[in-house]
Image (cartoon, rainbow, N blue to C red):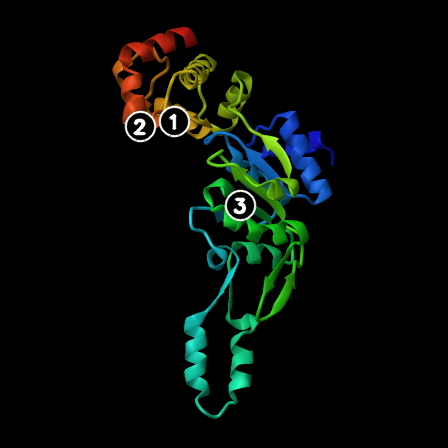
C-alpha cells in the first residue's frame, strides 16, 4: 500500500485527506512512529484517528488530556478496593509477604489508556487527544511509551508492548510542546480546509444538498473564518449548520433570512461572536458566497 491508496481508503471511510497528510500518515505507519497533528480546533484532527482505525479495522483507544492529568489516570493504578477485600479475606492464615506479592499482581492492576494500548494482541490506534492541555510534567510519562512502547510499574517491572499501537497525538496550540516529545514524532500541520476540500467533506459527511446551496454554506463558513471571531467555526460546525439548513427545508440561504440568522447558533459559540455577525453582516457574506 502506498500513500495514495491510504488516501483513497480514508476517503471511503469518510475522511478527505490531502496528499501531504496522507503521506504523513503513511510514513508514520511504515516507520512505526507516532504522528503529531497540530492545528486550530475543529479542523478534524481527532477524526483522522477514527478514520484510520476504521481503515485498519483496529480498535481505537483514546486518552483525552486535561490539566492535572497524571499517571494514575493515563497509565495505570491499583484496584485498591479489591486489594482491601483480598486483605480482609486472607486474615491471619496467610503470610504477609505472600499477601503482598499476590496483591501487587496484574490481577489487581487497572489498565488506563496508555497501558491498555500496549496490552492489545492486535495493534490498536492510540489517540492522545489535545496533549497541549496536559501539564508539561505529563509529557515525561509519555516519552518511555513513545520511544520504547513499554511501561514501568515498580511492583511488576517493565511491561513490554504485545503489539505496537499506531499513535496519533493532537494539539491545538494551547502551549508549546517539548523538544523531546517532538523528536519522537513525525509531524503534520492541519489547517482549515480550502473551498474544494470542504465541499468534498460536505458531500461525503453532510446531508444531500443542491450544489448551489452546498457552495453557499461552505462560502459563508469560509468567509466567517476570515472575520475577527473568538472561535472560528470548524468543519464540525459547518456540518452541523448544513444539517440544520437542510432540516429547516431551506434551499437557498437568501430565501428565509430570519431562519438562517437564527441557525447560526450552529456556527458561532460565544456571545461576542454572535454580536459580531448581525443580520446585515450575515447577508453580506451570503451575497458574496452566492
Q: Are marks 2 and 1 in contact (CB under 8 Å)?
A: yes
Task: Give how far across and how far down residue 140 sits, in percent.
Answer: 56, 51
Q: How far apart in space, not on screen, are marks 2 and 1 (Cα)?
A: 7 Å
Q: How far apart in space, not on screen, are marks 3 and 2 (Cα)?
A: 27 Å
Quadrant showing the N terminus: top right
In this view, which residue lies farthest toward the bottom? 93
Residue drawn at x 31%, y 16% as measured from the top left? 277
- Mark 1 and mark 3 lie on one chain; the one further toward the N terminus is 3
- Mark 2 and mark 1 lie on one chain; the one further toward the N terminus is 1
Quarter-of-image position of residue 92: bottom left
The answer to whether residue 259 shows anywhere in this view is: yes
Q: Which residue is mark 3?
A: 128
Task: Give how far across and how far down residue 113 sits, in percent.
Answer: 52, 54
Residue drawn at x 48%, y 93% as measured from the top left? 93
Task: Give how far across and how far down residue 228 sits, in percent.
Answer: 38, 18
Q: How far apart in space, not on screen, are marks 1 and 3 (Cα)?
A: 23 Å
Quarter-of-image position of residue 265: top left
Q: Which residue is mark 1?
A: 231
Amino acid at each position: 500500500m502506498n500513500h495514495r491508496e491510504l488516501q483513497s481508503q480514508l476517503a471511503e471511510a469518510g475522511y478527505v485527506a490531502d496528499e501531504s497528510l496522507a503521506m504523513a500518515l503513511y510514513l508514520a505507519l511504515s516507520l512505526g512512529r507516532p504522528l503529531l497533528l497540530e492545528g486550530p480546533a475543529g479542523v478534524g484532527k481527532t477524526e483522522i484517528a477514527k478514520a484510520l482505525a476504521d481503515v485498519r479495522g483496529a480498535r481505537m483507544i483514546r486518552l483525552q488530556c486535561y490539566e492535572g492529568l497524571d499517571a494514575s489516570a493515563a497509565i495505570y493504578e491499583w484496584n485498591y478496593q479489591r486489594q482491601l477485600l483480598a486483605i480482609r479475606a486472607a486474615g491471619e492464615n496467610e503470610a504477609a509477604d505472600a499477601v503482598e506479592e499476590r496483591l501487587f499482581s496484574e490481577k489487581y492492576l487497572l489498565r488506563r489508556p496508555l497501558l491498555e494500548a500496549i496490552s492489545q494482541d492486535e495493534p490498536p490506534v492510540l489517540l492522545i487527544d489535545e496533549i497541549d492541555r496536559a501539564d508539561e510534567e505529563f509529557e515525561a510519562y509519555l516519552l518511555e511509551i513513545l520511544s520504547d512502547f513499554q511501561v514501568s510499574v515498580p511492583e511488576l517491572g517493565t511491561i513490554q508492548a504485545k503489539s505496537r499501537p499506531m499513535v496519533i497525538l493532537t494539539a491545538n496550540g494551547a502551549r508549546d510542546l517539548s523538544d523531546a516529545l517532538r523528536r519522537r514524532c513525525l509531524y503534520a500541520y492541519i489547517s482549515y480546509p480550502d473551498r474544494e476540500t470542504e465541499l468534498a467533506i460536505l458531500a461525503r459527511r453532510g446531508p444531500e444538498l443542491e450544489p448551489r446551496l452546498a457552495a453557499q454554506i461552505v462560502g459563508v463558513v469560509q468567509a466567517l473564518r476570515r472575520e475577527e471571531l473568538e472561535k472560528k467555526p470548524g468543519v464540525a460546525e459547518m456540518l452541523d449548520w448544513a444539517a440544520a439548513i437542510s432540516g429547516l427545508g431551506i434551499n437557498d440561504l437568501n430565501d428565509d433570512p430570519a431562519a438562517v440568522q437564527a441557525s447560526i447558533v450552529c456556527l458561532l459559540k460565544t456571545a461576542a461572536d454572535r454580536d459580531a455577525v448581525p443580520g446585515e453582516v450575515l447577508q453580506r457574506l451570503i451575497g458574496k458566497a452566492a
